[in-house]
Amino acid sequence: MAKKAAVIRGDGIGPEVVDAMLSVLQECNLQSEIVMCEAGSEQWEKNSKRDETYIPDATMDELEHADACFKGPTTTLPIPNAPRSVAVTLRQKFNLYANIRPCSTFERLTPGRNLECVCFREATEGLYSGVEAQITPDSAIAIRKITRPGCARIVDASFAWARQHNMKRLVAITKRNILKMTDGIFWEEVLRASEQNPDIKVSEIYIDNMSQQLVIAPEQFNGAVLLSTNLFMDIISELVSGLVGSIGLIHSANMGDSYAMFEAAHGSAPDIAGQKKADPAATILAGAWMAEYLGEADIGGAVRAATKQVINEGKSVTADIGGTADTDKMAGAIASAALALLRK
Ligand code: ATP
């Protein structure tokens, strides 16, 4: 039976890049059913800001009845009492504990630098637990909640990825000399998994040194799985993404044990919304991964290879990576290249 994906187009450039991604998958004859639904701040504002969430009940219902979902970029408004971000809400609702961001350079964009690694971020605990307390009018605390089961599942997922992708190195990023208890539990779980995977070389690096190393010699992490807790990897994965060439190229998946959400790493980019200037690559790469997850691996593989080809050729690409094409033209070039690969 065909699987089903619920797709949120999102805010700002969201509709442009999500429509571009869907057109590529449809050109490739995706068999899975796609259901469109609304979420984000634009619909919240249209709805007179009455809801306590950016995700209407009807959308939550569609998401629950799908095998996976795609989230276009959604704006989180920086105003008091505005709802919690769509991504954080969905990660916690569906227990999507592994945020996985593969980062690969493209020859044309960073000649001489070859970096291929994957960032594994724990996505439900740490400083994103949402537990803060005002102690006095002039002081407040945020809780960095770390649990052993929470660490165990992200650590196991990262080792499983290393095994599946034949990656022989795993780098755990901590600040264990200062955060002795919380990062202590995390590191104990890394050591436990390491004993079960003796062929994968494990090292630990403190977050401050990691930041420096990524700036001065990023190639040393080529072929490695990078693993950390929620906020540390939020920051490190942005740093790694910056080495690739454009935020418009970076995508991620949020995985749980029985559900997944796919997304581009960039935001809703209101400064270029409605102008067809947005680079659709990140959204298309996330869509390719979703196709694989839904059981259509041939389409996923072809779309991924086609995206790489179009970016490296540089003839039909958007301005952020040195071209003059608009969003639809770049997506069209990717669709044609993917179809050619599928027909081979
Ligand atoms: P958020 O808080 O939602 O992540 P942000 O404002 O921090 O949003 P983005 O919306 O990602 O960040 O935008 C950062 C910059 O990157 C903007 O100048 C935007 O135009 C640019 N940008 C983001 N996505 C793309 C894209 N797909 N193609 C081209 N430029 C992009």
Image (cartoon, rainbow, N blue to C red):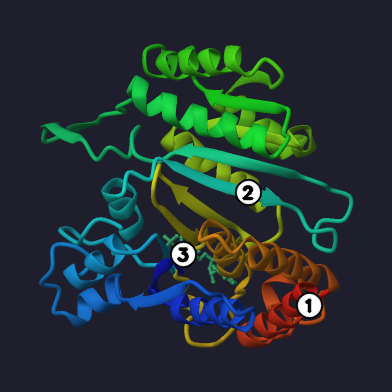
Is residue 155 positioned above or below 49 on the image?
A: above
Q: Which mark is residue 102?
A: 2
The structure residue drawn at horizontal position 48% and vertical position 59%, both measured from the top left corner, is 262
* Contact between labelled residues 2 and 3, with CB atoms less than 8 Å apart: no
Q: Which residue is mark 3?
A: 267
Q: Secondary structure at mark 2?
A: strand
Is residue 320 positioned above or below 194 on the image?
A: below
* Contact between labelled residues 1 and 2, with CB atoms less than 8 Å apart: no
Where is residue 234 drawn, in percent x and y? 48, 43
Where is residue 60 drawn, in percent x and y? 24, 64
Q: Earlier in the sequence, mark 3 or mark 2?
A: 2
Quadrant where the N terminus sits is bottom left
Q: Is mark 3 within 8 Å of ligand 1?
A: yes
Furthest-right residue in view?
Answer: 112
Is residue 221 positioned above or below 312 on the image?
A: above
Q: Nearer the viewer, residue 231 or 133?
A: 231
3 or 1: mark nearer the eye: 1
Q: Which residue is mark 1?
A: 343
Mark 3 vs mark 2, CA separation in Å = 17 Å
Q: Earlier in the sequence, mark 2 or mark 1?
A: 2
Mark 3 vs mark 1, CA separation in Å = 34 Å
Q: Nearer the viewer, residue 258 or 216?
A: 258
The structure residue drawn at horizontal position 63% and vertical position 29%, both measured from the top left corner, is 210
Residue 168 sits in which quadrant? Answer: top right
Where is residue 160 drawn, in percent x and y? 58, 32
Mark 2 vs mark 1, CA separation in Å = 27 Å
Residue 305 sits in which quadrant? Answer: bottom right
Q: Earlier in the sequence, mark 3 or mark 1?
A: 3
Q: Is residue 321 left or right of residue 232?
A: right
Quadrant where the C terminus sits is bottom right
Q: Amino acid at mark 3?
A: Gly
The structure residue drawn at horizontal position 75% and vertical position 38%, both measured from the top left corner, is 218
